[in-house]
């Protein structure tokens, strides 16, 4: 039997790396596995997907995963903005990076028809790795609850990747192993508890080519103003106009034109379109420090797009 996994994350959260570590750990156990990402024109903070297939027998499938057994969500703000449960098999698993209980997640997001595991992977990674890299603890949670791979295989693979030129006593190696172990230990689980709900989010059959509408022409510009992409953010820039020197470096590098000007002076930030890439903070002169990236409120709903 092939176990299929779909990762939902923001660019920069490590979904691609996490999927690759999982596949390599499975191969270390003598299994057959593959991992691959799905990329478009995303920038840091944009929604992305990655996929795994793991089996005890060889397989030849190389398409995207559309009916996963397991869904991994590295950013809870994606829920409601992307189709998390789309195609998820009846009784399938959802692993959610969030500082809430699994039963609460079921009730909040309507996931009663699925098995739910919650793990505060971001909190654990900040505690151990000093950075928000939730892919490492969530792999530990996956090993603990779904048993797809053993924790020991994940640890061995992590050491193999990180110890080159460092040694197993290196602080970075130790921090990653600690993050894996904490993810393994600090999880919460809720089983399926409402059988009357729809059994899965399976997609309806796709229409044939001759049933599709005739393609049209986009006859007006400026459509980017309509879609509020601020819901992509993990962090938001906070601007202190009292210390800003109005050098305009943040305005120059902003990929979303989210720095607002009046004449040649900065007057604010357009949070409807700011994706939280952090380039403005990087370019802000060190003596000014007028822009600082701060965490978005945990589980705060993102602004909906029309």
Image (cartoon, helix red, strand yellow):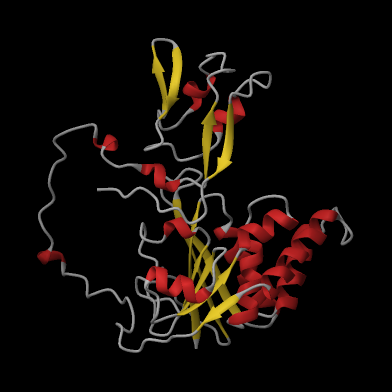
Q: Which residue corresponds to the image point at 68% horizontal and 50% vertical from the top-left? A: 131
Q: Is residue 148 visible?
A: no
Q: Which residue corresponds to the image point at 64% horizontal and 19% vertical from the top-left? A: 288
Rendered position, 7 above or below 54: above
Q: Could you tell whether 303 is left or right of 208 in the image?
A: right
Q: Position of residue 258 (x, y in %)?
A: 41, 30
- Pick the front one: 93 or 165: 93
Q: Position of residue 191 (x, y in %)?
A: 49, 85
Q: Position of residue 150 (x, y in %)?
A: 69, 80
Rendered position, 69 above or below 137: below
Q: Position of residue 210 (x, y in %)?
A: 10, 65
Q: Which residue corresponds to the image point at 28% horizontal and 73% vertical from the top-left? A: 203
Q: Could you tell whether 40 is left or right of 117 in the image?
A: left
Q: How many marks?
A: 0
Q: Could you tell whether 36 is left or right of 135 in the image?
A: left
Q: Could you tell whether 241 is left or right of 147 in the image?
A: left
Q: Is residue 164 visible?
A: yes
Name which quarter of the figure residue 118 lies in. bottom right
- Pick the front one: 220 or 73: 73
Name which quarter of the figure residue 263 lies in. top left
Rendered position, 95 above or below 167: below
- Pick the front one: 247 or 106: 106
């Amino acid at each position: 039997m092939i176990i299929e996994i779909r990762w939902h994350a923001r660019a920069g959260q490590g979904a691609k790396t996490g999927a690759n570590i999982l596949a390599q750990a499975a191969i270390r156990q003598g299994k057959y596995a593959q991992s691959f990402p799905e990329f478009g024109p995303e920038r840091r903070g944009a929604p992305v997907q990655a996929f795994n297939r793991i089996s005890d027998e060889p397989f030849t499938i190389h398409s995207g995963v559309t009916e996963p057994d397991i869904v991994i969500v590295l950013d809870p703000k994606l829920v409601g903005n992307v189709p998390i449960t789309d195609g998820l098999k009846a009784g399938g698993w959802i692993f959610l990076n969030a500082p809430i209980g699994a039963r609460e997640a079921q009730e909040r997001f309507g996931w009663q028809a699925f098995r739910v595991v919650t793990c505060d992977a971001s909190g654990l990674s900040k505690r151990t790795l000093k950075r928000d890299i939730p892919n490492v603890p969530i792999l530990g949670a996956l090993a603990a609850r779904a048993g797809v791979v053993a924790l020991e295989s994940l640890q061995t693979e992590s050491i193999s990747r990180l110890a080159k030129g460092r040694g197993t006593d290196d602080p970075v190696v130790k921090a990653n192993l600690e993050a894996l172990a904490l993810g393994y230990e600090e999880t919460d689980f809720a089983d399926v508890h409402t059988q009357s709900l729809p059994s899965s989010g399976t997609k309806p059959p796709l229409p044939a080519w001759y049933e599709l509408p005739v393609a049209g022409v986009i006859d007006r510009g400026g459509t980017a103003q309509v879609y509020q992409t601020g819901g992509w953010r993990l962090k938001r820039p906070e601007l202190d106009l009292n210390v800003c020197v109005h050098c305009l470096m943040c305005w120059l590098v902003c990929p979303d034109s989210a720095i607002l000007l009046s004449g040649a002076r900065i007057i604010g930030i357009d949070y409807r379109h700011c994706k939280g890439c952090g380039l403005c903070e990087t370019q802000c002169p060190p003596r000014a420090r007028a822009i600082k990236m701060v965490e978005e409120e945990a589980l705060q709903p993102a602004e909906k797009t029309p």
